[in-house]
Image (cartoon, rainbow, N blue to C red):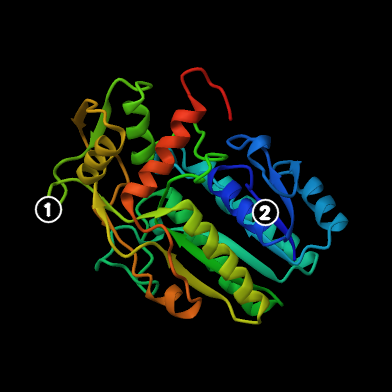
């Protein structure tokens, strides 16, 4: 299958491109490299471009006979979205709307969307199912909800089917340490903890200790990036077989608190790094855990890496390899 992957040079995108290449799909990666890297594209062809450049985007669609689009190009930092909502709505919503329009114009009928558990906000019930109310508490989550509404409407009006994948907390790295998280300003807990263990950060900030959870810190459902990449393969195969549009949670159905993760990182790395409790971050719900029964039943998804120690170990090997102190790449 000939597939366009937007944001395919980034952290999650590069792992999906790796998985698609292993299945021998023909891939064009479209990425402006603001957070991605050319060396991270292990398969396919890279086109450097921005989704806001509609002329270039349409040129690519005209030149390639795409059968599907996997859309990952988005801004993802919750705290930043609270400070700069226009930036998030413009990129995550407006640019995605233009991409969907290009798909319709060029008769691309299969679309995989990178959504987020942030669409649920503070869920009334945990684990949260796909049918739970969508009530985001930050602009990042709102931008994803807006796209999901558009996808639903477009699928009813055109020959266009989609799978929206609501990611929970994605972590880990390629087991061979070829690709992984590279953002210098990464905010995800596992990455920041590992960089503190390496001495890149002098301490780890623990955001909020007064949440209504057993130990007072936020609880999250962590999924290994390679398991998430496999989900995209299954979603594409489902659309190819003629299945209708669907929405799926992508998580392991159990969570770990911030304190749990920090302790596990210390165990894996052997480093007892300093942790400093600070106030809550804006837009952080107390707990987010997936009910993934739908995707397991409908797509026969069988996670391979549901082990927090393994997730942290692969990320640790990557962080040691990339050595952000000297800004070298693999």
Marker disc for residue 5: 2
Q: What residue sits 58% from the left and 52% below the top?
A: 72
Q: Quadrant of residue 186?
A: top left
Q: In the drawing, does residue 5 fall left or right of residue 288? A: right
Do the CB atoms of the residues marked 1 and 2 lie less than 8 Å apart? no
Query: Could you classify mark 1 by the number of other residues whose Cα lies within 10 Å: few (under 14), some (14-19), or many (20 or more)?
Result: few
Spot occupied by residue 29 in the image (x, y as percentages of width and height): 71, 48
Query: Could you classify mark 2 by the number of other residues whose Cα lies within 10 Å: few (under 14), some (14-19), or many (20 or more)?
Result: many
Spatial CA span between label 1 and label 2: 40 Å
Q: Quadrant of residue 61?
A: bottom right
Q: What residue sits 45% from the left and 32% below the top?
A: 319
Kindly tell me whether residue 83 is visible in this rendering: no
Kindly tell me whether residue 24 is visible in this rendering: yes
- The answer to whether 285 is drawn above or below residue 106 in the figure is above
Circle 1 is placed at which residue position?
214
Q: From the image, which quarter does the C terminus lie in? A: top right
Spot occupied by residue 258 in the image (x, y as percentages of width and height): 24, 44
Q: Which of marks 2 and 1 precedes in the sequence?
A: 2
- The answer to whether 55 is drawn above or below residue 117 in the figure is above
Q: Secondary structure at mark 2?
A: strand
Q: In the drawing, does residue 261 fall left or right of residue 240? A: left
């Amino acid at each position: 299958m000939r597939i366009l992957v937007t944001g395919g040079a980034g952290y999650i995108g590069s792992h999906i491109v790796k998985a698609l290449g292993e299945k021998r799909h023909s891939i064009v990666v479209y990425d402006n490299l603001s957070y991605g890297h050319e060396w991270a594209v292990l398969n396919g062809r890279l086109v450097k471009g921005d989704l806001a450049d509609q002329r270039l985007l349409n040129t690519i669609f005209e030149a390639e006979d795409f059968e599907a689009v996997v859309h990952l190009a988005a801004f993802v930092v919750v705290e930043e979205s609270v400070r700069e909502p226009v930036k998030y709505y413009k990129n995550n919503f407006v640019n995605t709307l233009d991409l969907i329009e290009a798909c319709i114009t060029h008769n691309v009928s299969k679309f995989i969307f990178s959504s987020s558990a942030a669409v649920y906000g503070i869920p009334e019930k945990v684990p949260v199912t796909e049918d739970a109310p969508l009530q985001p508490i930050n602009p990042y989550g709102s931008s994803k909800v807006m796209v999901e509404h558009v996808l639903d409407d477009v699928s009813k009006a055109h020959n266009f089917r989609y799978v929206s994948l609501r990611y929970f907390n994605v972590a880990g790295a390629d087991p061979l340490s070829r690709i992984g998280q590279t953002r210098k300003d990464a905010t995800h807990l596992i990455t920041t903890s590992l960089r503190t263990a390496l001495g890149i950060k002098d301490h780890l900030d623990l955001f909020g200790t007064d949440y209504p959870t057993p130990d007072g810190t936020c609880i999250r459902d962590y999924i290994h990036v390679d398991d998430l990449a496999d989900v995209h393969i299954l979603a594409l195969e489902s659309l190819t077989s003629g299945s209708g549009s669907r929405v799926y949670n992508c998580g392991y159905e159990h969570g770990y608190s911030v304190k749990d993760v920090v302790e596990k990182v210390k165990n894996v790395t052997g480093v007892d790094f300093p942790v400093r409790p600070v106030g809550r971050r804006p837009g952080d719900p107390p707990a987010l855990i997936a009910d993934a029964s739908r995707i397991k039943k409908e797509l026969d998804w069988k996670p391979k890496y549901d082990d927090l120690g393994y997730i942290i170990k692969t990320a640790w090997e990557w962080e040691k390899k990339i050595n952000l102190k000297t800004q070298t790449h693999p």
